[in-house]
Structure formats: C-alpha cells, structure tokens
Image (cartoon, rainbow, N blue to C red):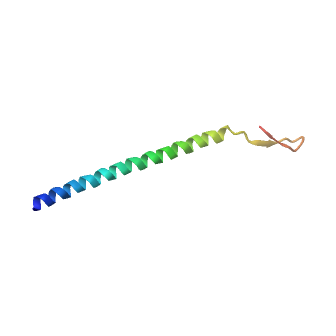
Amino acid sequence: MPPLIAFAGALGGLALLRWGFRAAVRINRELEEIRSARVAEAAHANEIKTLRRDPATGAYRPG
C-alpha cells in the first residue's frame, strides 16, 4: 500500500505543478496584452495635437 500512496502523491504533485505552470503562462499573457495596450495608447496620445494660445486673438488653436 505505501508505494501506491507515494505514486498517488507524485501524480498529484505533477498535476499541481502543471496547473501552476499553466496559470503562470496565462497571467503573463494577460499582462503582456495590457502592457502592449498601454504602449499603443501612449503612442496614440502623442498624435493628438495640443492647443496653443494665439497671441493676437487670445483663442486657443491646435498647433
């Protein structure tokens, strides 16, 4: 009986290790998607023109 218990424990440990590895890969994939979205958003923010004040009229215009 003890070899059977050791074998079951080893299988359970391997299953736990496999689950942990898959969870880590999934989490890293999600984090990478978030990081790439933030980079794309920052690049898009650089395309937006800022408003500058026209000294003659005092109005703000893109520039």
Residue 43 lies left or right of residue 6; in this view the side is right
Seen at 24% across and 52% down, the residue is 14
Residue 35 lies left or right of residue 54; in this view the side is left
Residue furthest toward the right?
A: 57
Residue furthest toward the bottom?
A: 2
Q: Where is residue 37 in the image (x, y as percent from the top left)?
A: 55, 43
Residue 5 lies left or right of residue 54; in this view the side is left
Total number of numbered discs in the rendering: 0
Quarter of the figure with the C terminus: top right
Seen at 60% across and 43% down, the residue is 42
* Camera-side residue of 39 and 63: 39
* Camera-side residue of 41 and 63: 41
Which corner quadrant of the image does residue 41 belong to? top right
Q: In the rendered image of this protein, does residue 3 appear above or below residue 59?
A: below
Seen at 42% across and 47% down, the residue is 28
Q: Position of residue 50 (x, y in %)?
A: 74, 42
Seen at 13% across and 58% down, the residue is 4
Residue 47 lies left or right of residue 17; in this view the side is right
Q: Where is residue 11 in the image (x, y as percent from the top left)?
A: 21, 54
Q: Where is residue 38 in the image (x, y as percent from the top left)?
A: 56, 45
Quarter of the figure with the N terminus: bottom left
Which corner quadrant of the image does residue 54 belong to? top right
